[in-house]
Image (spheres, rainbow, N blue to C red):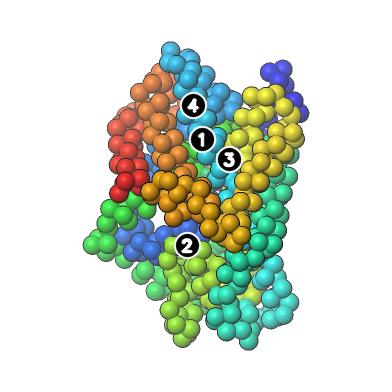
């Protein structure tokens, strides 16, 4: 389909489709992998409580700001910004903000699919194990804890495995984005998200009843305020941002496909609520399994930030569990589904821009963007092995030690995402005509006033502080 002005623009087929796709974008590796690990690293309950506060007072207002810019513009993120700015009598150059978002989404999808590749590999490993260990057995029967934990370094050390996983995940992502908004991205969300929820609830209930449920509850919901340090707070806000897909124009793009009958205030609440619920349930899914293995005598397992919790400790946990092979396989398939509904959202941001900017067909645009981001991702995949010594940002002190993967992650999370969100707040709170904003946000009365105050004052100031800490702290 060639996107000329004469061609009707593709969009979500219904309100439910929009909500599911946006939840699909938000719920991903950030919830399942990063949230439990960040909670583990940052003192459990204190982090969790502060995280919830961040979602309500910062994440939610920014989410609504992004979706309303998109719905108003009904175009790619930069064009939507330009339209709202022009109608508010402001400079059309505000589109640079969305351009940063497009660039960030491009960079994030490149390394996000590398982690997606790890998930593909673990699906394979558990699939093979299920055949070897049988249906009822624990995972990796007869193998020592050390052998199970060695699967991850084995993967990282192999350029071939890393590249294969990455390429498989990227090709699937490209395939669905190429099919378009309603036939591709929406299809993925409407089929995979319900399946995801069933698997998540099922595995969590099984883990809570057969594993160390009480310990997991105590760990996640005991609020020890002495643990609430500035670093913990920073980690919580950063996590909330990543998890809600904010600051990279992702939600501007998804909002642009929403029709006028969607109440954006209400749906933003549902999206943020669902995303947070999944993060909390993920904690209750992962920790009972890991704690049960520790109680069964395998020794201390890492619960700290990084790949270790999901890709090393959890597989050890599956060994100690009845039906562990089967549950492990189901778990990684579930993670793969969540990652795919997010990676298509990320790839759609630059793709929709290329379609519009260069008037190319969706197929050609997806291929151009997807293959370039995929090529950048190859470098990230190789930064765990062949290119491990390359320090692309060695000249910037805080990124001096970062390899290619970490540099892309660091630059997007610490600079582009907060910067994008701060500017979005300034734009919606101060620059855009209030009449246009009020016509889109679906809020009225006190709630509207509270939201406006959060967007104008609280969010930019708090985010500026976070960015300052992240960069110079
Ligand atoms: N929110 C996704 C996650 O939690 O994994 C990551 C993400 C998706 C970030 C889409 C940004 C985005 F536009």
Relative placement, left or right, of 360 versus 346 is right
Contact between labelled residues 3 and 1, with CB atoms less than 8 Å apart: no
* Label 2 Cα neighbours within 10 Å, binned few <14 / some 14-19 / many ≥20: some
Query: Mark 1 — residue?
Result: 101
Query: Mark 3 — residue?
Result: 106
Mark 1 residue CB less than 8 A from any atom of ligand 1:
no
Query: Mark 2 — residue?
Result: 306
Residue 96 numbered tag: 4
Relative placement, left or right, of 410 versus 159 is left
Asked if 42 appears above or below 167 in the picture, the reply is below
Q: Nearer the viewer, residue 452 or 445?
A: 452
Asked if 112 appears above or below 7 in the picture, the reply is below
Give the residue drawn at x 66%, y 55%: 166
Q: Earlier in the sequence, mark 3 or mark 4?
A: 4
Q: For numbered disc 4, what is the local secondary structure?
A: helix
Residue 242 percent coordinates (x, y): 47, 47
Q: For numbered disc 1, what is the local secondary structure?
A: helix
Give the residue drawn at x 53%, y 58%: 389
């Amino acid at each position: 389909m060639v996107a000329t002005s004469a061609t009707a623009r593709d969009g979500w087929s219904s309100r439910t489709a929009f909500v599911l796709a946006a939840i699909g974008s938000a719920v991903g590796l950030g919830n399942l992998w990063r949230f439990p690990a960040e909670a583990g690293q940052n003192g459990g309950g204190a982090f969790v409580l502060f995280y919830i506060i961040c979602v309500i007072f910062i994440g939610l207002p920014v989410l609504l700001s992004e979706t309303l810019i998109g719905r108003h513009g009904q175009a790619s993120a930069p064009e939507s910004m330009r339209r709202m700015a022009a109608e508010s009598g402001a400079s059309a150059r505000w589109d640079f903000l969305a351009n940063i978002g497009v660039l960030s989404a491009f960079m994030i999808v490149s390394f996000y699919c590398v982690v997606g590749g790890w998930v593909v590999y673990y699906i394979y490993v558990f699939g093979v194990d299920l055949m070897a260990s049988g249906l009822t057995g624990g995972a990796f029967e007869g193998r020592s804890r050390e052998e199970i934990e060695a699967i991850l370094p084995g993967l990282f050390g192999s350029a071939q495995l890393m590249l294969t996983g990455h390429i498989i995940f990227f090709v699937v992502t490209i395939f669905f984005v190429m099919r378009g908004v309603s036939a591709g991205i929406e299809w993925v969300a409407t089929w995979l998200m319900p399946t995801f929820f069933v698997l998540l609830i099922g595995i969590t209930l099984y883990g809570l009843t057969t594993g160390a449920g009480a310990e997991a509850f105590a760990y996640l919901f005991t609020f020890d305020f002495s643990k609430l340090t500035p670093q913990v707070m920073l980690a919580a806000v950063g996590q909330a941002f990543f998890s809600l897909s904010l600051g990279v124009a992702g939600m501007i793009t998804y909002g642009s496909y929403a029709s006028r009958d969607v109440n954006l205030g209400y749906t933003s609440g549902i999206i943020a609520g669902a995303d947070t619920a999944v993060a909390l349930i993920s904690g209750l899914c992962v920790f009972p399994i890991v704690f049960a293995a520790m109680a069964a005598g395998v020794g201390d397992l890492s619960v700290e930030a990084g790949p270790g919790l999901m890709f090393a400790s959890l597989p050890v946990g599956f060994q100690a569990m009845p039906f562990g092979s089967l549950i492990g396989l189901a778990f990684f398939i579930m993670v793969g589904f969540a990652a795919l509904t997010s990676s298509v959202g990320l790839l759609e941001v630059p793709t929709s821009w290329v379609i519009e900017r260069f008037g190319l067909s969706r197929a050609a645009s997806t291929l151009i963007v997807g293959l370039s981001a995929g090529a950048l991702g190859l470098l990230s995949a190789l930064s765990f092995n062949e290119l491990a010594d390359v320090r692309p940002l060695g000249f910037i002190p805080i990124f001096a030690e970062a390899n290619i993967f970490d540099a892309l992650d660091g630059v997007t999370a610490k600079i582009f995402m907060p910067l994008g969100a701060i500017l979005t707040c300034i734009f919606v709170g101060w620059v855009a005509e209030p009449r246009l904003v009020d016509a889109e946000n679906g809020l009225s009365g006190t709630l509207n006033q509270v939201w406006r105050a959060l967007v104008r004052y609280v969010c930019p100031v708090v985010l500026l502080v976070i960015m300052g800490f992240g960069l110079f702290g």
